[in-house]
């Protein structure tokens, strides 16, 4: 297709790209919907995992916290088992090509496409619209740039990102149709279990970093100690029934989904284990399964964070390596779109 295709430059494996915003502590939804699947499948692909710090600027932020959260997300990737021999971990803002390609894509994106995005509608509802920055609207163009710069084949994400990947395909197709085949079309990879973990306080709302800031009982953070995890599950919303029934209502379904996803058990096993049990028994079982899954991650996390200087060095080196690919894609787009000095 083109002279820069990474897959013809030594790596026969399909390319995976994904990222997480350092906009708050990472929670169980981020782990079950995304990171855990990245870890499981990392040998099948040539992986790039990004800490998307520029995306974290689409809502108000505190500079000190942004720095801390950026290191935290990178350390969590490693602590969860992302290996640096199969995967490259880097920070988005270290490669300026992301912002530059995002600008070109923004200019090619009809406003209506962005205004229809569910995430934009949710986060800018009502009077919020007068307060939120324009970056929240143009956010998908930056995400598309992230993905398209690396000739990505697959993007493993939770269900809430499906629309953004569809947009990425649409805008890539638009560029290719108008200017020639310069971009690779990616596909979303969405897990069967764990793709949409709901809030413990409100099973009608997706577990999110933003909602967790207002109400800590909303989410289990990956760094929560066992006692906190037990307390959060003990207070989780359940249903009006006296015991666990199948099919369950939304609160119990969410707890069961977490249990199933953490223990990787089957739906039949789930029903056999919990049908007729009290909510307390269910909550305790879920809490203990989550604590057991997080224990080794928390240990590794502490180790990694004991040497931030090393972490920053690794992130910088990774960005230097990846910039070569990113700049090549950007140069290709700049050339075909008529920007001077790129022929
Ligand atoms: P973010 O930071 O909101 O979430 C990171 C990942 O976690 C998944 N996720 C969930 N999965 C299941 N249940 C939940 N409650 C839940 N909450 C979050 C998300 O689907 C995501 O996979 N726009 C992206 C970040 C991004 C990106 C990219 C992703 C920027 N550029 C390029 C992939 C490729 C976001 O805000 O994710």
Image (spheres, helix red, strand yellow):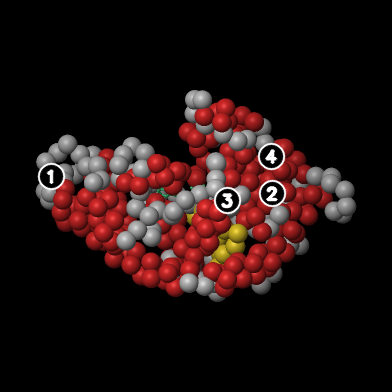
How many residues crowd around disc 4 within 10 Å: few (fewer than 14), some, or many (20 or more)?
Answer: many
Q: CA distance from mark 1 to mark 3?
A: 47 Å
123 vs 274: above or below: above
Q: Is the Cβ of the residue at disc 4 closer than 8 Å to that at disc 2?
A: no
Give the numbered dot on residue 106: 4
Spatial separation of the CA atoms under disc 3 and disc 4:
26 Å
279 vs 202, left or right, is left
> Label for residue 206?
none
Residue designated by label 1? 243
Badge 1: residue crowd in 10 Å (few <14, some 14–19, many ≥20): some
Question: Tag on residue 99?
Answer: 2
Looking at the rendered image, the disc whose residue lies closer to the viewer, 3 or 4, is 3
**Frontmost residue, 185 versus 297:** 297
Question: In front: 218, or 254?
Answer: 218
Mark 1 and mark 4 in contact? Answer it, CB < 8 Å.
no
Quarter of the rendering containing residue 296? bottom left
Q: Position of residue 13 (x, y in %)?
A: 58, 67
Is ligand 1 less than 8 Å from the beta carbon at label 1?
no
Mark nearer the viewer, 1 or 2: 2
- Closer to us: mark 4 or mark 2? 2
């Amino acid at each position: 297709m083109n002279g820069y295709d990474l897959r013809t430059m030594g790596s026969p494996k399909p390319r995976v790209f994904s990222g997480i915003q350092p906009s708050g502590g990472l929670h169980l939804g981020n782990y079950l919907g995304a990171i855990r699947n990245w870890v499981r499948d990392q040998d099948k692909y040539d992986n790039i995992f990004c800490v998307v710090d520029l995306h974290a600027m689409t809502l108000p932020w505190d500079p000190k916290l942004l720095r801390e959260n950026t290191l935290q997300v990178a350390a969590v990737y490693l602590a969860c088992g992302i290996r640096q021999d199969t995967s490259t971990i880097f920070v988005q803002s270290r490669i300026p090509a992301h912002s530059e390609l995002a600008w070109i894509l923004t200019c090619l994106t009809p406003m209506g496409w962005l205004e229809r995005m569910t995430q934009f509608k949710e986060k800018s509802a009502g009077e919020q619209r007068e307060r939120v920055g324009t970056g929240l609207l143009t956010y998908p163009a930056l995400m598309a740039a992230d993905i398209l710069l690396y000739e990505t084949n697959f993007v493993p994400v939770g269900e809430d990102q499906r629309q953004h990947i569809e947009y990425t395909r649409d805008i890539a197709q638009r560029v290719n149709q108008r200017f020639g085949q310069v971009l690779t079309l990616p596909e979303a990879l969405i897990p069967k279990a764990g793709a949409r973990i709901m809030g413990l306080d409100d099973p009608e709302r997706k577990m999110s970093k933003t909602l967790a800031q207002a109400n800590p009982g909303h989410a289990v953070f990956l760094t929560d100690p066992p006692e906190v995890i037990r307390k959060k599950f003990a207070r989780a919303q359940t249903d009006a029934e006296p015991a666990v029934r199948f099919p369950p209502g939304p609160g119990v379904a969410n707890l069961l989904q977490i249990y199933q996803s953490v223990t990787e058990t089957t739906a039949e096993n789930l029903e056999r284990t919990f049908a007729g049990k009290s909510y307390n028994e269910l909550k305790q079982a879920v809490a203990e399964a989550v604590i057991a899954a997080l224990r080794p991650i928390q240990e590794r996390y502490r180790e990694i964070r004991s040497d931030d200087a090393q972490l920053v060095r690794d992130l910088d080196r990774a960005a230097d390596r990846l910039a070569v690919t990113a700049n090549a894609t950007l140069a290709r787009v700049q050339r075909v779109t008529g920007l001077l000095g790129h022929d």
